[in-house]
Image (cartoon, rainbow, N blue to C red):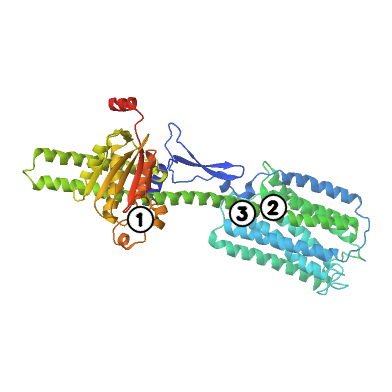
Amino acid sequence: MPPFIRYGLRLRGWGRLSARTVPGGMRITPRSPQPGRPAADPGRVTLSPVLDTPLSARVSRAPLLAAAIVPVVTALIFMGADRVLGPVPAFLPAFLAVVWASDLLTAFLLITQFLAGGDRRLLALSCAYLWSAAVIVPHALVFSGLFSPTGLLGATPSSAPWLWTAWHTGFPLLIGIALGPWPRRLEREPAPAGRRRPMAAAATGSMLAGAAAAAWLVTAQAEHIPVIMVNGDYRVLTERFGTAIIAVNVVALALAATRFRGAVRGLEAWAAVAVIASCGDVLLTLFAGARFTFGWYGARLLALVAALVVLTSLLREITTLYRRVRRHADVLGLHNEELRRANALRDHLVAVVSHELRSPLTAVRGFLEIIDENPGLPPERARQMIARSQILLARLTMLTEDLLTTPGLEAGQLPVNPVPVNLREALTECAVLFPEASITVDCPDGPPARVDPLRLQQIVGNYVRNALKYGRPPVVLEARFGADAVDIRVRDHGTGVPPEFVPRLFDRFSRADDDRVRSTAGVGLGLSIVASLAEAHGGRAWYDSSSGPGACFVVTLPLTQGPEEEHLNAAA
C-alpha cells in the first residue's frame, strides 16, 4: 500500500486495524496497539481465519445424525419388504430422471471444485457420480416396460438387473476409494494446475467408456452372461451373486467410515452417508425378491437419498460461500471507501499546503530582499521587518504541524491555541503584511478576542487576498463587538458575489462561474480554510450580502469571558 495512504489512515485516528468475526459476518474495527507490541500497519486489513477455511472443512453433526437415521429407515422398510404394491407407470421414469440429473449436476460441481483447487479426492468422488449417471442411461433403455415391453438395445430380461448390479457396486466402491486412506503425498499436494483439465477429461472418459462397455456386455453379449431374471423374479441374483454384491458394499462402507473418525467434516461426511444409503438400497432390492414390492420402492427411496445428499451439501456450501463472499465484498467496499477518503484527504492537504505556504514565503522573501538591498535601512525599520518575518515563519511552522494533524482539515477540528488578543493590533499587523495594497483598519476599542493569533492572521490574510484578487480597492478591515463575540469584516468595493453562488461560497474547490474568477489563478480553497479555522475557534465564517456595494466577508469569533480569564492567560 502506498505510504501516503497508510499515513492518511493513521491521521484519521484509526490506530491499528483488525478484522473481528461477528455472528453476521466480519467487521473491521480500529483498535490501539497493545502495550509492548508494535502497532500493525493500519493500511492492512486482517481477515478472519474463518474466511480462509474451506467450507467443506467445517465441523457438522448433521452427517452423523443422517448416518444413524438411514439404517433405522432401512430396517423399518425391510420388515415389509416382500409386500407387493403393484406398478406405478410414472414412478420409474421420474425416479431415474431425478437420480440421473442430480448425479450429473453433482459430478459437474465436484469437477468444477477440483479444477479450482486441485483436490484429487473431489475428482475421485466425481467419478462415482459420473459412473452412476452414465449407467442409468442404458439401464433405463433396457428396462422392460419403460420404453418398450421388452426394452431397447436388444435387451434380455437379465440386462436391467445386471446394469443395476454394475451401478450399485461401482457407485459405492468409487465413493469408498475417494474417502478411504490415501498416500500422504497425494493427500497434501493439490494436482498441478496444468494437469487438472486433462485429469478431469480422463476421468470422465473412463467412466463413460466403462458404462458403454457394461451396456454392450449385457445386451450384445447377453448369451455369455448368467440369466438372473426369471419371470420378473430376480432371486437368482440374490442367491448366486448377492453375497459378492453385499461384500463390495461392505468394503465401500468400511472405507467411507474412515471419514467419521474424529471430527466429522462437511462434504466427505455426506458422501459417506450416500454410501450408507446405497447399502440400504442394495439390501432392500436383493431381498425384496421382485419388482414393485414395498422393499423395491423403499430401495428407490434410499437411492434418491444417495443421489441427493452430496448435491444438497454442495448447493448449501455454494450458497454459504456466496453469502460470505458478499459480506467480504461489503467489508472490502467499506475499506476501499476509507482509502478513497484518505486519498481525497491527501489531495486536499497538498492543495491547502500549496495555497497557504505561498503568501508567507513571498512576504518573507520580500522583507529579506528589502533588508539586503538597503544597507542604510534604519535599525528600527529593519527590526520590524525581521519581527514580521519571524511571525510569518511561525505561521509556516504552524502549517507544517497541520500536515501532521490532517484530520482537522476535514473535520473542522484544527488545533488552535486561543489566547486573549488585542484586535486593533492584530488587524493592523495583518494589514502591514500587504504593503502593496490599500487597506484601511477600522477597529474601535473593545475587549480582547479569544483566538489563536497565528490562526487569526491566517483567517484575515485569506479574506484580504480574496478581496484583492476578485474585488476592488480600497479594502477595509472592520471589527464590530457584541456581548460575547466579535464580527471581523473584510470589505472591498467590487461587484460582490453572485447571489446564486453564495450557498457554495465556503465549499472546497468551489469557484464562481465568472470571467474575472476564471482569469484569476486559484483553486477555491481559501474560504474553506477560513470556515474550518472559524469552526475550530467555536465561531463561524459567513458572507454578508446586505452590507451595501462590494463584497463583505465576515468571521465571528468569541471574546474573552472577563478580566479573570484575561489575567490567567497573561500569567500563563
- Residue at figure coordinates x 91%, y 49% from the top left: 79
**Disc number for residue 313:** 2
Question: In the shown orientation, is residue 508 left or right of residue 133?
Answer: left
Query: Which quadrant is the C terminus positioned in?
Result: top left
Give the image location of residue 298, x and y in percent.
85, 55
**Disc number for residue 497:** 1
Of discs 1 and 3, which sits in the foreground? 1
Question: In the shown orientation, is residue 444 left or right of residue 193?
Answer: left
Of discs 2 and 3, which sits in the foreground? 3
Marks 1 and 3, Cα distance to the nearest angstrom?
54 Å
Amino acid beneath label 3: Tyr
Label 1 neighbour load within 10 Å: few <14, some 14-19, many 20+ = some
Are the residues tagged 2 and 3 within 8 Å (C-beta)? Answer: no
Give whichever of 522, 226 is nearer the camera. Answer: 522
Are the residues tagged 1 and 3 within 8 Å (C-beta)? Answer: no
Q: Residue 208's image quarter? A: bottom right
Q: Which residue is mark 3?
A: 322
